[in-house]
Amino acid sequence: QRWKDRIVKTGCFDYSREMILRFARNTTQKGRFSEERAWKAMKKFKKRNMMLSVHQLEQQLLSKTLFPVPGLKSLGGHDMFYMRPSRYFPKQTKTKTVIDNLAYVMNTMLEKEHCCTEGIGFVACMDNWKFENFEVNYCYQFMMGLQGCVVPVQVQLFLIVNPPSWFGAIWRIMKPMLAPSFRKKVKMIPESRLGKYLQAGFEMFLPDDMRTGEASTDSMVSDFVTFRHSVETRIKTRGCFSDSGSNSDRVSLSERSTTVSGETNNDQHPQDVLSFRWNSSLASSAGSNSGSVPQASRSENEDNNDDASIHCDIHGDLDDDFSVLTGDTRGDRVVPAAVERAPRATRG
Protein backbone atom coordinates (compact mmCIF):
# COMPACT_ATOMS: atom_id res chain seq x y z
CA GLN A 1 0.00 0.00 0.00
CA ARG A 2 2.89 2.39 0.72
CA TRP A 3 4.25 1.72 -2.76
CA LYS A 4 0.80 2.38 -4.25
CA ASP A 5 0.63 5.69 -2.38
CA ARG A 6 4.07 6.65 -3.70
CA ILE A 7 3.01 5.76 -7.24
CA VAL A 8 0.00 8.08 -6.98
CA LYS A 9 2.12 10.93 -5.57
CA THR A 10 5.01 10.62 -8.04
CA GLY A 11 3.04 9.70 -11.16
CA CYS A 12 5.21 6.58 -11.55
CA PHE A 13 3.97 3.86 -13.92
CA ASP A 14 1.15 2.08 -12.12
CA TYR A 15 2.29 -1.47 -11.32
CA SER A 16 -0.05 -4.24 -10.26
CA ARG A 17 0.55 -6.15 -7.02
CA GLU A 18 2.06 -9.05 -8.96
CA MET A 19 4.56 -6.76 -10.68
CA ILE A 20 5.46 -5.04 -7.40
CA LEU A 21 6.15 -8.47 -5.93
CA ARG A 22 8.49 -9.19 -8.84
CA PHE A 23 10.49 -6.07 -7.98
CA ALA A 24 10.51 -7.01 -4.29
CA ARG A 25 11.85 -10.50 -5.04
CA ASN A 26 14.53 -9.12 -7.33
CA THR A 27 15.89 -6.57 -4.84
CA THR A 28 16.16 -8.63 -1.66
CA GLN A 29 18.94 -7.80 0.78
CA LYS A 30 20.46 -10.69 2.73
CA GLY A 31 17.43 -12.84 1.93
CA ARG A 32 14.85 -10.27 3.08
CA PHE A 33 12.55 -7.93 1.20
CA SER A 34 13.82 -4.34 1.04
CA GLU A 35 11.10 -1.77 0.42
CA GLU A 36 13.54 1.06 -0.39
CA ARG A 37 15.63 -0.98 -2.84
CA ALA A 38 12.50 -2.18 -4.63
CA TRP A 39 11.14 1.36 -4.84
CA LYS A 40 14.41 2.67 -6.34
CA ALA A 41 14.32 -0.09 -8.96
CA MET A 42 10.68 0.70 -9.83
CA LYS A 43 11.43 4.41 -10.28
CA LYS A 44 14.36 3.72 -12.64
CA PHE A 45 12.59 1.01 -14.58
CA LYS A 46 11.76 1.75 -18.24
CA LYS A 47 8.13 1.12 -19.06
CA ARG A 48 8.96 0.23 -22.68
CA ASN A 49 10.72 -2.95 -21.51
CA MET A 50 7.32 -4.23 -20.38
CA MET A 51 5.61 -3.38 -23.65
CA LEU A 52 7.86 -5.23 -26.13
CA SER A 53 6.04 -7.47 -28.58
CA VAL A 54 6.84 -10.24 -31.04
CA HIS A 55 5.78 -7.92 -33.88
CA GLN A 56 8.64 -5.54 -32.98
CA LEU A 57 11.23 -8.29 -32.51
CA GLU A 58 10.24 -10.97 -35.02
CA GLN A 59 13.26 -10.47 -37.29
CA GLN A 60 15.66 -10.57 -34.34
CA LEU A 61 13.98 -13.67 -32.85
CA LEU A 62 14.17 -15.49 -36.20
CA SER A 63 17.94 -14.91 -36.23
CA LYS A 64 18.05 -17.69 -33.58
CA THR A 65 20.39 -15.62 -31.43
CA LEU A 66 18.44 -15.85 -28.15
CA PHE A 67 15.25 -17.76 -27.33
CA PRO A 68 13.62 -19.84 -24.56
CA VAL A 69 14.00 -23.63 -24.61
CA PRO A 70 10.79 -25.42 -23.50
CA GLY A 71 11.40 -28.49 -21.36
CA LEU A 72 15.06 -27.70 -20.60
CA LYS A 73 15.56 -27.35 -16.84
CA SER A 74 18.45 -26.98 -14.43
CA LEU A 75 18.97 -29.48 -11.62
CA GLY A 76 17.23 -26.94 -9.38
CA GLY A 77 14.13 -27.02 -11.63
CA HIS A 78 14.70 -23.62 -13.29
CA ASP A 79 13.44 -23.12 -16.85
CA MET A 80 16.30 -22.26 -19.21
CA PHE A 81 16.77 -19.92 -22.14
CA TYR A 82 19.53 -20.17 -24.72
CA MET A 83 21.88 -17.91 -26.65
CA ARG A 84 24.31 -18.40 -29.49
CA PRO A 85 26.53 -15.28 -29.13
CA SER A 86 28.34 -16.03 -32.41
CA ARG A 87 25.15 -14.97 -34.24
CA TYR A 88 25.34 -11.44 -32.89
CA PHE A 89 27.59 -8.90 -34.64
CA PRO A 90 27.80 -5.48 -32.94
CA LYS A 91 28.66 -3.77 -36.25
CA GLN A 92 25.53 -5.15 -37.93
CA THR A 93 22.91 -5.16 -35.14
CA LYS A 94 22.27 -2.41 -32.60
CA THR A 95 22.95 -3.23 -28.97
CA LYS A 96 19.41 -2.06 -28.15
CA THR A 97 17.98 -4.79 -30.40
CA VAL A 98 19.71 -7.69 -28.66
CA ILE A 99 18.93 -6.23 -25.19
CA ASP A 100 15.26 -5.96 -26.22
CA ASN A 101 15.51 -9.60 -27.36
CA LEU A 102 16.81 -10.53 -23.89
CA ALA A 103 14.11 -8.52 -22.09
CA TYR A 104 11.31 -9.97 -24.23
CA VAL A 105 12.37 -13.58 -23.78
CA MET A 106 12.76 -13.21 -20.01
CA ASN A 107 9.36 -11.48 -19.79
CA THR A 108 7.64 -14.33 -21.63
CA MET A 109 9.29 -16.87 -19.31
CA LEU A 110 8.11 -14.91 -16.26
CA GLU A 111 4.51 -15.43 -17.34
CA LYS A 112 4.95 -18.73 -15.52
CA GLU A 113 4.50 -18.50 -11.75
CA HIS A 114 7.41 -20.82 -10.93
CA CYS A 115 9.84 -18.64 -12.92
CA CYS A 116 8.66 -15.57 -10.99
CA THR A 117 9.13 -17.16 -7.59
CA GLU A 118 12.21 -19.34 -8.16
CA GLY A 119 14.02 -17.71 -11.07
CA ILE A 120 15.31 -18.92 -14.43
CA GLY A 121 18.57 -20.19 -15.97
CA PHE A 122 20.65 -19.28 -19.01
CA VAL A 123 22.85 -21.30 -21.40
CA ALA A 124 25.30 -19.49 -23.69
CA CYS A 125 26.91 -21.74 -26.31
CA MET A 126 30.22 -20.15 -27.32
CA ASP A 127 30.89 -22.35 -30.38
CA ASN A 128 32.32 -20.34 -33.32
CA TRP A 129 32.43 -17.20 -31.16
CA LYS A 130 35.11 -14.70 -32.15
CA PHE A 131 36.28 -11.34 -30.90
CA GLU A 132 34.26 -9.63 -33.65
CA ASN A 133 31.13 -10.83 -31.78
CA PHE A 134 32.17 -8.88 -28.69
CA GLU A 135 31.83 -5.23 -27.69
CA VAL A 136 32.28 -3.83 -24.17
CA ASN A 137 29.10 -1.72 -24.05
CA TYR A 138 26.98 -4.61 -25.35
CA CYS A 139 28.56 -6.96 -22.81
CA TYR A 140 27.91 -4.54 -19.95
CA GLN A 141 24.26 -3.94 -20.84
CA PHE A 142 23.69 -7.68 -21.29
CA MET A 143 25.23 -8.49 -17.90
CA MET A 144 23.06 -5.81 -16.28
CA GLY A 145 20.04 -7.40 -17.96
CA LEU A 146 20.88 -10.80 -16.49
CA GLN A 147 21.14 -9.18 -13.04
CA GLY A 148 17.64 -7.71 -13.17
CA CYS A 149 18.31 -4.18 -14.41
CA VAL A 150 16.31 -4.50 -17.64
CA VAL A 151 13.33 -6.45 -16.28
CA PRO A 152 12.87 -7.65 -12.68
CA VAL A 153 14.16 -11.21 -12.84
CA GLN A 154 16.31 -13.66 -10.90
CA VAL A 155 18.78 -15.59 -13.08
CA GLN A 156 19.86 -18.45 -10.84
CA LEU A 157 22.30 -20.21 -13.21
CA PHE A 158 24.49 -18.91 -16.05
CA LEU A 159 26.26 -21.62 -18.08
CA ILE A 160 29.02 -20.50 -20.47
CA VAL A 161 29.52 -23.60 -22.60
CA ASN A 162 32.62 -24.32 -24.74
CA PRO A 163 34.38 -20.98 -24.16
CA PRO A 164 37.41 -20.44 -26.44
CA SER A 165 40.88 -20.85 -24.97
CA TRP A 166 41.39 -17.06 -24.88
CA PHE A 167 38.12 -16.37 -23.03
CA GLY A 168 40.09 -15.49 -19.89
CA ALA A 169 40.75 -12.05 -21.39
CA ILE A 170 37.01 -11.51 -21.85
CA TRP A 171 36.29 -12.77 -18.34
CA ARG A 172 38.61 -10.10 -16.93
CA ILE A 173 36.40 -7.50 -18.61
CA MET A 174 33.14 -9.19 -17.57
CA LYS A 175 34.04 -9.87 -13.96
CA PRO A 176 33.77 -6.27 -12.64
CA MET A 177 30.32 -6.06 -14.26
CA LEU A 178 28.94 -8.82 -12.04
CA ALA A 179 27.97 -8.62 -8.39
CA PRO A 180 29.82 -11.14 -6.18
CA SER A 181 26.59 -13.04 -5.51
CA PHE A 182 25.95 -13.36 -9.26
CA ARG A 183 29.49 -14.52 -10.05
CA LYS A 184 28.80 -17.63 -7.97
CA LYS A 185 26.08 -18.55 -10.45
CA VAL A 186 28.44 -18.43 -13.45
CA LYS A 187 29.84 -21.79 -14.61
CA MET A 188 32.29 -22.08 -17.52
CA ILE A 189 32.20 -25.64 -18.73
CA PRO A 190 32.79 -27.87 -21.76
CA GLU A 191 29.64 -29.30 -23.33
CA SER A 192 30.45 -32.72 -21.92
CA ARG A 193 29.70 -31.44 -18.39
CA LEU A 194 26.20 -30.10 -19.06
CA GLY A 195 24.73 -33.12 -17.28
CA LYS A 196 26.17 -31.83 -14.02
CA TYR A 197 23.91 -28.77 -14.12
CA LEU A 198 20.88 -29.83 -16.20
CA GLN A 199 18.20 -32.41 -15.46
CA ALA A 200 18.51 -35.92 -16.90
CA GLY A 201 17.36 -36.21 -20.51
CA PHE A 202 18.34 -32.62 -21.29
CA GLU A 203 19.61 -33.72 -24.72
CA MET A 204 16.00 -34.12 -25.95
CA PHE A 205 15.31 -30.42 -25.31
CA LEU A 206 18.71 -28.89 -26.09
CA PRO A 207 18.88 -27.08 -29.49
CA ASP A 208 20.48 -29.22 -32.16
CA ASP A 209 23.02 -26.57 -33.09
CA MET A 210 24.94 -27.94 -30.10
CA ARG A 211 26.68 -31.28 -30.57
CA THR A 212 24.58 -33.11 -27.94
CA GLY A 213 21.28 -31.33 -28.73
CA GLU A 214 18.40 -33.24 -30.34
CA ALA A 215 15.62 -30.60 -30.58
CA SER A 216 15.25 -28.77 -33.90
CA THR A 217 16.42 -25.17 -33.41
CA ASP A 218 14.50 -23.95 -36.47
CA SER A 219 11.22 -25.51 -35.30
CA MET A 220 11.73 -24.31 -31.74
CA VAL A 221 12.17 -20.67 -32.81
CA SER A 222 9.45 -20.64 -35.49
CA ASP A 223 6.96 -22.31 -33.10
CA PHE A 224 7.77 -19.73 -30.43
CA VAL A 225 7.23 -16.81 -32.82
CA THR A 226 3.98 -18.30 -34.15
CA PHE A 227 2.69 -18.93 -30.64
CA ARG A 228 3.53 -15.42 -29.43
CA HIS A 229 1.80 -13.88 -32.45
CA SER A 230 -1.32 -15.87 -31.63
CA VAL A 231 -1.26 -14.96 -27.94
CA GLU A 232 -0.42 -11.29 -28.37
CA THR A 233 -3.05 -10.78 -31.07
CA ARG A 234 -5.69 -11.86 -28.58
CA ILE A 235 -4.12 -9.79 -25.80
CA LYS A 236 -4.11 -6.73 -28.05
CA THR A 237 -7.81 -7.17 -28.69
CA ARG A 238 -8.36 -6.93 -24.96
CA GLY A 239 -6.34 -3.70 -24.72
CA CYS A 240 -3.34 -5.09 -22.87
CA PHE A 241 -0.72 -3.41 -25.07
CA SER A 242 -1.84 0.15 -24.28
CA ASP A 243 1.04 2.64 -24.27
CA SER A 244 -1.02 5.48 -22.89
CA GLY A 245 0.32 7.25 -19.83
CA SER A 246 -3.08 7.99 -18.31
CA ASN A 247 -4.14 6.17 -15.16
CA SER A 248 -7.25 4.76 -16.83
CA ASP A 249 -5.27 3.17 -19.67
CA ARG A 250 -2.27 1.80 -17.80
CA VAL A 251 -1.89 -1.94 -18.15
CA SER A 252 0.99 -3.78 -16.48
CA LEU A 253 2.97 -6.75 -17.69
CA SER A 254 1.46 -8.97 -15.03
CA GLU A 255 -2.02 -8.19 -16.35
CA ARG A 256 -0.78 -9.27 -19.78
CA SER A 257 0.60 -12.41 -18.16
CA THR A 258 -2.73 -13.20 -16.52
CA THR A 259 -4.43 -12.84 -19.88
CA VAL A 260 -1.88 -15.14 -21.52
CA SER A 261 -2.20 -17.82 -18.85
CA GLY A 262 -5.97 -17.66 -18.94
CA GLU A 263 -6.10 -17.98 -22.71
CA THR A 264 -3.63 -20.82 -22.97
CA ASN A 265 -5.19 -22.84 -20.18
CA ASN A 266 -8.83 -22.53 -21.22
CA ASP A 267 -9.68 -21.41 -24.74
CA GLN A 268 -7.00 -22.72 -27.05
CA HIS A 269 -6.60 -21.17 -30.46
CA PRO A 270 -5.95 -23.60 -33.37
CA GLN A 271 -2.50 -22.06 -33.86
CA ASP A 272 -1.64 -23.04 -30.30
CA VAL A 273 -1.72 -26.71 -31.27
CA LEU A 274 1.27 -26.06 -33.52
CA SER A 275 3.08 -24.70 -30.47
CA PHE A 276 1.88 -27.09 -27.78
CA ARG A 277 5.27 -26.95 -26.07
CA TRP A 278 4.78 -23.23 -25.35
CA ASN A 279 1.31 -23.86 -23.86
CA SER A 280 2.82 -26.19 -21.28
CA SER A 281 5.72 -23.86 -20.56
CA LEU A 282 3.31 -21.00 -19.76
CA ALA A 283 1.06 -23.01 -17.44
CA SER A 284 1.45 -21.93 -13.81
CA SER A 285 2.92 -24.41 -11.35
CA ALA A 286 0.11 -25.44 -9.04
CA GLY A 287 2.38 -26.26 -6.13
CA SER A 288 4.62 -23.18 -6.23
CA ASN A 289 4.89 -20.95 -3.20
CA SER A 290 4.21 -17.40 -4.42
CA GLY A 291 5.27 -15.85 -1.15
CA SER A 292 8.75 -17.29 -0.97
CA VAL A 293 11.95 -15.45 -1.77
CA PRO A 294 13.76 -17.26 -4.61
CA GLN A 295 17.01 -18.90 -3.59
CA ALA A 296 19.64 -20.40 -5.85
CA SER A 297 19.74 -24.16 -5.82
CA ARG A 298 22.61 -25.44 -3.71
CA SER A 299 23.27 -28.25 -6.15
CA GLU A 300 24.07 -25.65 -8.82
CA ASN A 301 26.17 -23.26 -6.73
CA GLU A 302 27.86 -25.21 -3.98
CA ASP A 303 31.00 -26.21 -5.93
CA ASN A 304 32.30 -22.90 -7.24
CA ASN A 305 35.86 -24.11 -7.77
CA ASP A 306 35.11 -27.24 -9.83
CA ASP A 307 35.81 -25.47 -13.10
CA ALA A 308 39.11 -23.92 -12.01
CA SER A 309 40.86 -25.43 -15.02
CA ILE A 310 38.85 -23.11 -17.25
CA HIS A 311 38.84 -19.99 -15.12
CA CYS A 312 40.77 -19.16 -12.00
CA ASP A 313 38.31 -17.23 -9.90
CA ILE A 314 34.63 -16.32 -9.91
CA HIS A 315 34.66 -14.54 -6.56
CA GLY A 316 35.27 -10.84 -5.97
CA ASP A 317 34.96 -7.98 -3.57
CA LEU A 318 32.55 -5.58 -5.28
CA ASP A 319 29.59 -4.23 -3.33
CA ASP A 320 26.32 -6.15 -3.69
CA ASP A 321 24.55 -2.92 -4.65
CA PHE A 322 26.39 -3.09 -7.99
CA SER A 323 23.58 -5.31 -9.24
CA VAL A 324 20.98 -2.54 -8.98
CA LEU A 325 21.35 -0.13 -11.90
CA THR A 326 24.96 1.00 -11.43
CA GLY A 327 27.29 2.60 -13.94
CA ASP A 328 27.45 5.99 -15.64
CA THR A 329 24.78 6.76 -18.21
CA ARG A 330 25.96 8.86 -21.15
CA GLY A 331 23.14 9.14 -23.64
CA ASP A 332 22.48 5.65 -24.99
CA ARG A 333 25.87 4.37 -23.85
CA VAL A 334 26.23 2.87 -20.39
CA VAL A 335 29.80 2.32 -19.19
CA PRO A 336 30.81 0.58 -15.95
CA ALA A 337 33.12 2.69 -13.82
CA ALA A 338 35.71 -0.10 -13.64
CA VAL A 339 35.94 -0.25 -17.44
CA GLU A 340 35.94 3.54 -17.84
CA ARG A 341 38.92 3.84 -15.48
CA ALA A 342 40.89 1.16 -17.34
CA PRO A 343 43.71 2.15 -19.74
CA ARG A 344 42.65 2.71 -23.33
CA ALA A 345 44.37 -0.47 -24.55
CA THR A 346 42.46 -2.57 -22.00
CA ARG A 347 39.18 -0.96 -22.97
CA GLY A 348 39.68 -2.13 -26.54
Image (tube, rainbow, N blue to C red):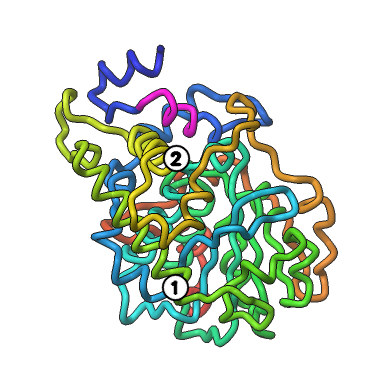
Residue at 80% over, 63% down? 196
Regarding mark 1 in the picture, which secondary structure is present there? Answer: loop
Q: Quadrant of residue 165?
A: bottom right
Determine if residue 196 is in view: yes
Q: Is residue 231 left or right of residue 141?
A: left
Task: Name the residue type under label 1.
Answer: Thr
Task: Name the residue type under label 2.
Answer: Asn
Regarding mark 2 in the picture, which secondary structure is present there? Answer: helix
Q: Which residue is mark 2?
A: 265
Question: Observer-nearest residue: 51 or 69?
Answer: 69
Determine if residue 136 is in view: no
Tally of numbered discs: 2
Question: Observer-nearest residue: 167 or 22?
Answer: 22
Q: Is residue 256 left or right of residue 66?
A: left
Residue at 41% over, 44% down? 264
Q: Which residue is mark 1?
A: 65
Q: Label 1 vs label 2: CA separation?
A: 29 Å
Q: Position of residue 82 (x, y in %)?
A: 54, 66
For the stretch drawn in magenta, the main secondary structure is helix
Check the image and report above or below for 61 versus 10.
below
Q: Which residues are magenta?
A: 16-23
**Which tag, 1 or 2, sits closer to the chain's start?**
1
Q: Quadrant of residue 266?
A: top left
Q: Residues within 10 Å of mark 2 (few under 14, many from 20)?
A: few
Does residue 20 show up magenta in the picture?
yes
Of labels 1 and 2, the one closer to you: 2
Residue 252 is labelled as none
